[in-house]
Amino acid sequence: MTQSTPYVLSGARNFRSFNGYRNADGEQIKPGKLFRSGALQHSSPNALQHIRDEIRLSTVVDLRRPNERELTPNPDVGAEQHQICVVKNDSMYLWQAFVECRLDRGECEDFMLNYYRLLVREPAAEGYRQIFRLLLEDRGPLLFHCSAGKDRTGYLAAVIKMALGFDADLIMRDFLLSNEVIRNSGHWSEMREREDIPDEVDWESIAPLLMVNEEYLKSSLDEMHKLSGGVDAYLSERLGLDGAARTELRRILCTA
């Protein structure tokens, strides 16, 4: 089956559409229906104008913690804002350790693997349940985002595709696309200047924090199997997506 690449918006952090890929039944997510991104505050004026005037979002779901939202509040894009924090604990200690060069690569990798397991468990699952309830209300064009648009957002994008019957290899390929999008955007160079990160920081060592890895999403899948015995059971038991809900979600989001 032929697959195309989702639309990527230049000038916005990891902002991309969901259409282009097809599931096992040949359906794709309706164009203009669902989007994902990093923090909108870092978007260029042209990108923000495009979001307001062309994409015309009806709903924005912000997955970030309160302190993140306070540091970089969302600009007005003409949409209803929902603040649904999926990771309750504050991980600023990790950022401070990173800036002070106190983490090696193995510690960074271990942190991220555990982080992706936490996304599967409560209380993160409650936040994701809320988002699926919004999706099932058929609110029109919806964007969900976190800070970089790769972890909390990338996990949710993968779970949405699981619920819609997309192939596991395709889900992983789209998950890993964040690396290419972020690398091409100059996001980390911008972050280094903005956060005044010391020159002695070993970027190779902290690369696991800055990019996504196949093992991260696999750790989430392993946790789903541990909790519920499999992905389908997890979707039903933990996210409220039984057969009827998934059929309705496909009706709302997908087209032939």
Image: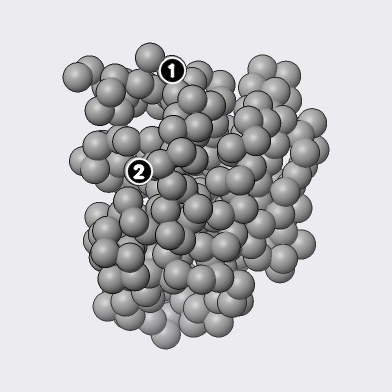
Describe residue 175's horizontal placement relative to residue 65 as left or right: left
Q: Secondary structure at mark 1?
A: strand
Residue found 54% across the figure and 55% down from its top: 128
Q: Position of residue 74 (x, y in %)?
A: 74, 47
Image height of 111 relative to 212, above or below: below
Residue found 72% across the figure and 30% down from its top: 58
Q: Position of residue 142 (x, y in %)?
A: 62, 34
Image height of 108 relative to 170, above or below: below
Look at label 2 and name its amino acid. Answer: Met
Q: Which is more toward the observer, 152 or 24? A: 24
Examine the image and state in which quarter residue 110 appears.
Answer: bottom left
Image height of 89 relative to 60, above or below: below
The quadrant of the picture occupied by the N terminus is top left
The quadrant of the picture occupied by the C terminus is top left
Look at label 1 and name its amino acid. Answer: Thr
Q: Secondary structure at mark 2?
A: helix
The structure's colour scheme is one colour
Q: Which is more toward the observer, 173 or 159? A: 159
Q: Earlier in the sequence, mark 2 or mark 1?
A: 2
- Circle 2 residue: 162
- Circle 1 residue: 255
Q: Position of residue 174 (x, y in %)?
A: 33, 39
Residue found 38% across the figure and 46% down from its top: 158
Q: How many marks?
A: 2
Outermost residue on the front side: it is 244
